[in-house]
């Protein structure tokens, strides 16, 4: 009986020694372990600036609209008809065309270099002169048609379709004699503002 008790005591002591030894070994391992690595915070590299934050690009200046090239049809004999000159509306003017001054037929009877048709107007309210050029014209021995681009100031367009009443222009130059009569139309933005039958007298432009 005593031997059995002694054996149990030895077993308990052995177990206790094993537990103590194991505890000492684990503690030493923990103490000798290197400290955990410190991770340094890294600031992220700045992002590339957005396109919207880039330096503003200077806007490209818009080019003026090209002036349309005139298209003239000259169907007459320059030796029989020489309409080169200035044409003034005979008074009294219709109130709808009170600002219409005159037009010039600077024509040379040459299809390759026909010349120009220039229209002169005046603002009744501000007394400002205005002008424009014809972009289309048809001239025959007895008829005249033309259509203009917009006037520089008011943006108005004119169209005329008429008939020569006589061809001896020099004989009636600077006189209040009608040499041309037809329908004159004034429009803006494609809308007709006025349309009247009018007559014109003739003045020389010189050489």
Image: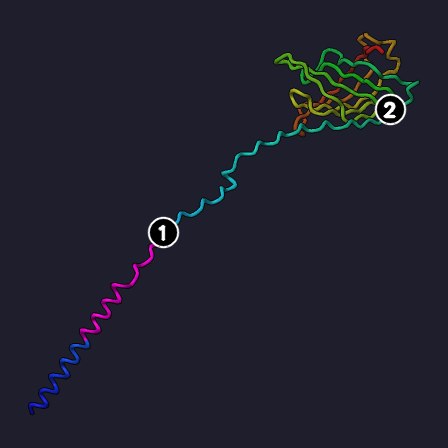
Query: Which is closer to the viewer, label 2 or label 1?
Result: 1
Q: Is residue 45 left or right of residue 89?
A: left
Residue with the most extreme right position: 79
Mark 2 lies on residue: 140
The image shows residue 53, relative to residue 66, as above or below, that is below
Coloring basis for residues:
rainbow
Give the mark count: 2
Q: Earlier in the sequence, mark 2 or mark 1?
A: 1
Residue density around tag 2, few if under 14, some if 14–19, many if 20 or more, within 10 Å: some
Comparing 54 with 17, the one in front is 17
Instruction: Indicate the position of residue 118 as horizontal and vertical percent values.
Output: 76, 19
Above/below status of 145 relative to 93: below
Horizontal side of 198 relative to 141 (left or right) equals: left
Principal SS element in the magenta part?
helix
Q: Residue furthest bottom?
A: 1
- At 26% across and 65% down in the image, what residue appears? 30
Whether 37 is among the magenta residues is yes
The part of the chain drawn in magenta is 19-41
Q: Which mark is residue 40?
A: 1
Could you tell me which residue is drawn at 80 percent across and 28 percent down? 71
Q: Is residue 134 above or below residue 101?
A: below
Q: Quadrant of residue 160?
A: top right
């Amino acid at each position: 009986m005593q031997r059995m008790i002694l054996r149990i005591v030895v077993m308990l002591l052995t177990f206790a020694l094993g537990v103590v030894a194991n505890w000492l070994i684990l503690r030493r391992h923990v103490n000798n372990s290197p400290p955990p690595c410190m991770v340094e915070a890294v600031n992220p590299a700045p992002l590339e600036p957005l396109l919207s934050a880039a330096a503003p690009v200077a806007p490209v200046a818009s080019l003026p609209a090209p002036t349309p090239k005139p298209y003239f049809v000259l169907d007459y004999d320059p030796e029989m008809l020489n309409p080169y000159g200035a044409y003034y509306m005979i008074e009294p003017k219709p109130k709808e065309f009170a600002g219409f001054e005159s037009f010039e037929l600077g024509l040379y009877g040459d299809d390759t270099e026909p010349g120009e048709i220039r229209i002169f107007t005046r603002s009744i309210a501000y007394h400002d002169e205005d002008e424009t050029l014809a972009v289309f014209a048809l001239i025959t021995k007895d008829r005249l048609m033309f259509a203009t681009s917009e006037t520089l100031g008011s943006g108005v367009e004119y169209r005329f379709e008429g008939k020569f009443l006589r061809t001896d222009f020099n004989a009636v130059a600077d006189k209040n004699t009608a040499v041309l009569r037809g329908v004159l139309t004034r429009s803006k933005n494609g809308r007709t503002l006025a349309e009247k039958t009018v007559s014109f007298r003739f003045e020389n432009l010189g050489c």
